[in-house]
Image: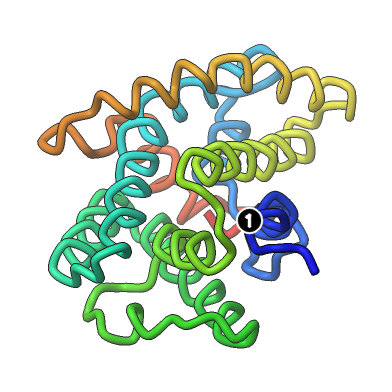
Amino acid sequence: MKSDSELACYRLFQLISPSLPIGGFTYSQGLEYAVEAGWVKDRVSLEEWLIYMVESSVATLELPIIDKLYQALDTQNMEVIEHWCDVLYTSRETSELRAEERQRGHALNTLLRQLDIDISVVERLSSHPNQLLGLCIAAKAWSIDLATLKQGYLWSWLENIVTAGVKLIPLGQTDGQLALINITGCFPKVITQALHIEEWMIGSFTPSIAIASSLHQTQYTRLFRS
């Protein structure tokens, strides 16, 4: 019988898989409008757009909040958990991005409940559902350490949105793989950057993403929900 720690890497693969039924592949986070407007039109501009996102939002918002939630779960500090869930939700600047946060969180919570993972922490919160708390709860249940969880989260975010870019621009599969290689090259720096974000600095600083997301709400034809 394998211990939980020996199985942790496989549980992480499951948690970050595109097949996880939380609908990650249905969102583009404003990329669909950016392609429509010609802001993103090839692999190079896609890489620039996504590096901007990861350095100015993922590294400054999601990764630090994963740190906070993961650590707060150790002590079941509901006040801290509630606070950072609220910060995450209020940092989503458009109705589409907030809806995405709620929908992903709700879907993940439903799945974890069906997998017999204790989500009583979620049920005690008044905050909107969010994916990050669910990921941290699953990581605790499956003995996935914090550093590995953050690496997995980065990969999952990138794979989903690059796949969206391949469909929207469109790009060939090889260009999609090159984009994954080139963007993951900055991930070690991003993880280090996130470790040095002070609490007052936690937030998203991506006005062009917010504009794209807002305009996506009235885009005439859409493949994605955000």
Relative depth, front residue between 161 and 75: 75
Decide if residue 49 is on the left or right side of residue 94. right
Q: Kindly identify which residue carries mark 1.
A: 5
Decide if residue 196 is on the left or right side of residue 172. left
> Which residue is drawn at the image coordinates 45% and 45% (left, top)?
146
> Which residue is drawn at the image coordinates 31% and 40% (left, top)?
64
| Above or below, 85 relative to 173 | below
Q: Position of residue 132 (x, y in %)?
A: 43, 57
Q: Residues within 10 Å of mark 1 (few under 14, many from 20)?
A: few
**Element type at mark 1:** helix
Q: Which of the colour schemes (rainbow, by chain, secondary structure, one colour) is used? A: rainbow
For the image, the number of numbered tags is 1
Decide if residue 66 is on the left or right side of residue 202. right
Q: Position of residue 110 (x, y in %)?
A: 55, 83
> Which residue is drawn at the image coordinates 16% and 61% (left, top)?
80
- Residue occupying the far front of the picture: 1
Q: Position of residue 187 (x, y in %)?
A: 54, 22
Q: Position of residue 18 (x, y in %)?
A: 74, 55
Quarter holding the N terminus is bottom right
Say which quarter of the image contains residue 195. top left
| Above or below, 10 relative to 158 | below
